[in-house]
Amino acid sequence: MNILLTNDDGIFAPGLEALHRELKNLGQVAVVAPESEQSAVGHAISLATPLRVKQVALPGGGGGWAVTGTPADCVKIAIAELLPQPPDLVVSGINLGPNVGINVLYSGTVSAATEAAILGVKGVAVSLNTYKDADFDSAASLAGDLVRRLQQWPGWTNGVVLNINLPALPREQIRGVKVTRQDTGKLVERFQRRVDPRERVYYWLAEINEHRCVETDTDYAALQDGYVSITPIHFDLTHYTSLETLKGQGW
């Protein structure tokens, strides 16, 4: 199996390094990732500036391509120019921090996997539910096992992304795996108001993951309860109920 590995935390991020080591047990792995961190850029692509690509030595051995662009740029340029043939699978991660609920729309990690689906390749996004003291080696081992199992699922088509979120727990404490839907509950966002040395006010987005109400069958709830969450997502944003209602009214 030919695998393209990318992320949004940058090509030298420890999460990518750990996942690279693990995925090499599953097939040939090519690494094409942003030169610098691109967190929360969503599905942005570069139009007004050129993409510069350079080969780099990876900390865990081997080489990869560092791209001066977004995660979606990395997948595009890899499939269009850098790889001799399209990969069988694109894996994005391991992200430092979860990507559940509405955050999947902001996430560069998820967007890289979604770009794969747009281009007709299976995509996986992997995120770890912590922002500090991450055990990426254990997370990568679990992610590798999940990818192995999911490869046997006949319903996984090339237009589907599997958004995987892992609890930041020792493996023996993880309660299991749940297949979930994306949480659509309202986020409770919080900004910190600060003043710079020149007495100018600025604001820093401090929290976008808080929920006041949790529905139990969602990615957010599963992760909070200590389960691995796997959510099949796709890039079709059509609201079909509204579509049929408008058609029924003669539009």
Image: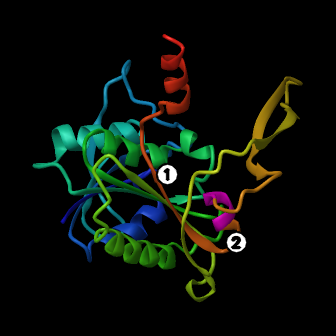
Q: Residue furthest left?
A: 84
At label 1, counting other C-alpha atoms closer than 10 Å, the crowd grade (few under 14, some 14-19, many 20 or more) is many
- Look at mark 2 in the image and give the residue it sits on: 225
Residue at 62%, 81% in the rendered image = 175
Question: Is residue 193 left or right of 12 when viewed as pictured?
Answer: right
Residue at 58%, 89% in the rendered image = 172
Which residues make up the magenta segment?
A: 218-222
Q: Which mark is residue 30?
A: none
Q: Position of residue 226 (x, y in %)?
A: 66, 74
Q: Secondary structure at mark 1?
A: loop
Q: Position of residue 198 (x, y in %)?
A: 85, 24
Camera-near label (1 vs 2) is 2
38 to 154, vertically: above or below = above
Q: Which mark is residue 9?
A: 1
Residue 1 placement: quadrant: bottom left
Amino acid type, label 2: Asp
Q: Position of residue 84 (x, y in %)?
A: 10, 49
Q: Are discs 1 and 2 less than 8 Å apart at CB?
A: no
Q: Residue furthest top?
A: 251
Q: Position of residue 12 (x, y in %)?
A: 42, 57
Total number of numbered discs in the rendering = 2
Amino acid type, label 1: Asp
Does the stretch in magenta take in 130?
Answer: no
| Mark toward the start of the polypeptide (1 vs 2) | 1
